[in-house]
Structures are given as C-alpha cells and as structure tokens.
Image: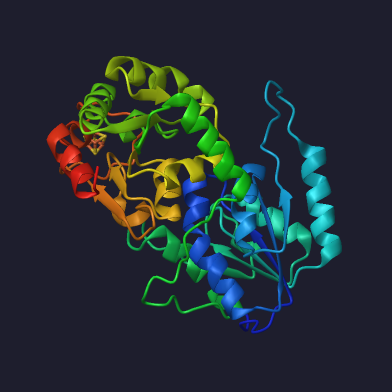
C-alpha cells in the first residue's frame, strides 16, 4: 500500500461510480458522506448515463460525465473515442482526488490518466501502482459493500459512517412520478393498491426464485385486492409476460417500458415490492418501499439492499454463499424459500 497524508480539504473530487444499479445505490452513503465532509467541494461523477440520471437529482455531485459501455450495441468496436473525451475533460478539470469504486484495472487506469493527485481504490487486479491509496479489500461478505465503498472516502477525510442511518430516501423527479402514474393507469386501471415484482436478475438463475412461485404469489396478492406489476428490462420481457399471463387478471408486465427514474417512482407507490437480489430490490429499498428480497447464491450480509423497510429472506444451505450464476445441485437455496413464507412477509408489509 502506498502511504500518503490524508487530504483534508480537496476542492475538486472525482467519483468513478460502479457500473451496476445495485452497486451504485450502495455508493449513496459515500456520496452523502462526501457532501457532509466537504460541502464546498465540487464533485463530479463518472459512470453509466442511466445511473447518473437517477442519482443526479440528489445533488450529491455537481456534474456528471457518462462513461460509455465497452461496446456500442451491435458493434464490436470499443467506444474508445468517447472514453478519451471523458478522460481529457477530467484531466482539464484537474481533480484533487479521485475515488475509484469499481474494482477493475481499467477504472484505476482511468483515474491515473485524469491526473488526480490522490487516487483511492481497493488493491485488486495488479492495479495498486496506479493508485496513491490502494486499500486492502476485506474478504467478500466481511462487511457490507456500502461500508467498503464508504471507507474509500477515509483518505480524503470522509467518515466515520454515522451509526444511525442518515440516508434520505431517493426521491424520483416529478416527471418520473407522472410517467409512473400514467403507466399504472394503463396497465392496471382499477388498482387501489399495488405490488411490484422483479422476478429476474441480470446475474443469472442462481439469483432467481422460481417463476411459477412468482405467478402463484401474484394470484394471492390479487386475491387480497392488490394489482401486481411485473418489472424487468427489455431482455426480461418474456419471463415477466409469462408470469402476468399465468397469474391472470390484475397482473400486468411493464418489462422494458420504464427508465430508472420512472421505475423508482412506480415502486415508491407499491405497498410491497418482491424482488430477487437484483437492481430493483436496491431501488425499492432506496425509495423507502417495503421490500421483500429473496436471496439465492449470494451473500445478503454483503449486498443486501439498503433501506428502512427492506426484509431479506434467505435459507442458506451449507454450500451458500457460492456466488455462482448457475447451480449443479438444484438451486436448493432458492427452492427452500416457500410460497407461504414469502407471502407471509408480504402480509407483514401490509399487502
Ligand atoms: S451451490 Fe448452493 S448456494 Fe450455490 S446456487 Fe446451488 S444451492 Fe444455491
């Protein structure tokens, strides 16, 4: 580890955000802590455009530059030029400090190329020489990922993490509220109370509760007077539609029809959100919705969604957490989560 003096008053702070929705939401304690510690500093965030758009209204950062995905859709050519433009923009801005939240070599290399005087990240993938503060990364699951991110602020005087949860709820912008209201009115016109489901996970089947149980749960919720909206990405549309079709009237899929702020506004209106360990679970938790999160192969101690009303259901077998995307022994961690148990958690949330 390279040892440098903590920088107590950086004026320009660059934050390279994580690339995944859940991870970016777990960076919120750090972003808020940075604002508290350095109210006069100018903070700029770099990350995927959709995540910047979701987080920008909180004003934990003053400016944002979208970091393009590695490849343009349908193209095999890296978006090298766009990335170079972001690097030049940041270098011209002359950051005093760069906090690198992703664990990749390339993100540390990006920070190095911006010329930031202080560059903080975890030691990983031989990237320590690129960082001025290469922190030792705790073993996976030893502490919550939000705490891992928060610790990256230490070298610039952020912290300690307050013991009481100081995180304000994520508030979607008014236009997202209007869009969500329009979608709900179209999908489930007579809904007095709403439940939201997120039955997929980008990570893979080892984080996905069985589809037929989601459909059965949706039927029970409809039986108690709720309408159910099944959410997901465009790639997850088929599963979401299948659940809606199996569950019957009162259940509709809006997979692929929402951007993140609209999804945040939609889930904020829900009496309960039932989610796999996925980005939507984190989003539901962040807006303060009652969130029932179903855990499979991963560690809830490490990555449970943050939020005042998040409930984790997990029955870890001895093989858990394996962090695998698929399972060779029958997904016992997921099949062990019974319909009655999940439904019971929904009832306790008022659904
Ligand atoms: S090996 Fe165990 S923890 Fe991993 S997916 Fe299979 S049942 Fe779940």
- Name which residue lies at 47% across and 41% down: 266
Image quarter where ligand 1 lies: top left
Q: Is the residue 264 above or below the residue 151 in the image? A: above
- Name which residue lies at 49% across and 54% down: 25
Q: Is the residue 289 above or below the residue 329 in the image? A: below
Whether residue 20 appears in this view of the structure is yes
Q: Is the residue 13 above or below the residue 282 in the image? A: below
Whether residue 199 appears in this view of the structure is no
Q: Is residue 186 left or right of residue 174?
A: left
Residue 67 in percent (x, y) is at: 70, 45
- Name which residue lies at 25% across and 33% down: 225
Q: Quadrant of the N terminus?
A: bottom right
Q: Quadrant of the C terminus?
A: top left
Residue 327 in percent (x, y) is at: 27, 29
- Name which residue lies at 46% across and 79% down: 160
Q: Quadrant of residue 121?
A: bottom right
Q: Quadrant of residue 127?
A: bottom right
Give 31 or 343, whichever is nearer the viewer. 343
Give 113 or 223, whichever is nearer the viewer. 223
In the rendered picture of this protein, how many numbered marks are placed on residues?
0
Residue 18 in percent (x, y) is at: 56, 51
The colour scheme of the drawn protein is rainbow
Q: Quadrant of residue 220?
A: top left
Residue 343 in percent (x, y) is at: 18, 38
């Amino acid at each position: 580890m390279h040892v440098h003096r903590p920088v107590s008053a950086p004026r320009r702070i660059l934050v390279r955000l994580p690339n995944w929705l859940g991870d970016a939401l777990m960076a919120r304690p750090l972003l808020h802590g940075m604002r508290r510690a350095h109210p006069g500093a100018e903070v700029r965030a770099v990350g995927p455009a959709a995540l910047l758009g979701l987080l920008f209204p909180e004003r934990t950062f003053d400016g944002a530059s979208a970091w393009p995905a590695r490849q343009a859709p349908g193209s095999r050519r890296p978006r090298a030029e766009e990335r170079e433009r972001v690097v030049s923009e940041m270098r011209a801005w002359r950051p005093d400090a760069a906090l690198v939240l992703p664990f990749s070599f390339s993100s540390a290399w990006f920070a190095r190329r911006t010329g930031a005087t202080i560059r903080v990240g975890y030691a990983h993938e031989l990237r320590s020489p690129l960082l001025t503060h290469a922190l030792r990364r705790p073993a996976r699951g030893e502490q919550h990922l939000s705490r891992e991110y928060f610790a990256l602020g230490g070298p610039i005087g952020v912290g300690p993490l307050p013991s009481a949860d100081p995180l304000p709820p994520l508030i979607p912008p008014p236009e997202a509220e209007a869009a969500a209201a329009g979608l709900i009115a179209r999908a489930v016109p007579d809904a007095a109370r709403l439940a939201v489901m997120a039955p997929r996970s980008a990570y893979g089947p080892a984080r996905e509760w069985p589809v037929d149980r989601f459909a059965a749960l949706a039927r029970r919720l409809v039986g108690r007077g709720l309408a159910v909206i099944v959410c997901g990405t465009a790639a997850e549309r088929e599963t979401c539609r299948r659940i809606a079709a199996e569950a019957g009237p009162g259940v509709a899929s809006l997979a692929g029809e929402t951007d993140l702020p609209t999804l945040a506004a939609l889930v904020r209106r829900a009496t309960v959100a039932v989610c796999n360990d996925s980005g939507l679970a984190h989003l539901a938790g962040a807006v303060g919705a009652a969130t029932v999160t179903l855990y499979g192969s991963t560690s809830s101690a490490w990555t449970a969604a943050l939020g005042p009303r998040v409930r984790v259901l997990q029955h870890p077998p001895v093989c858990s957490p394996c962090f695998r995307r698929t399972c060779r022994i029958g997904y016992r961690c997921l099949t062990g989560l019974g319909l009655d148990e999940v439904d019971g958690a929904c009832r306790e949330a008022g659904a």
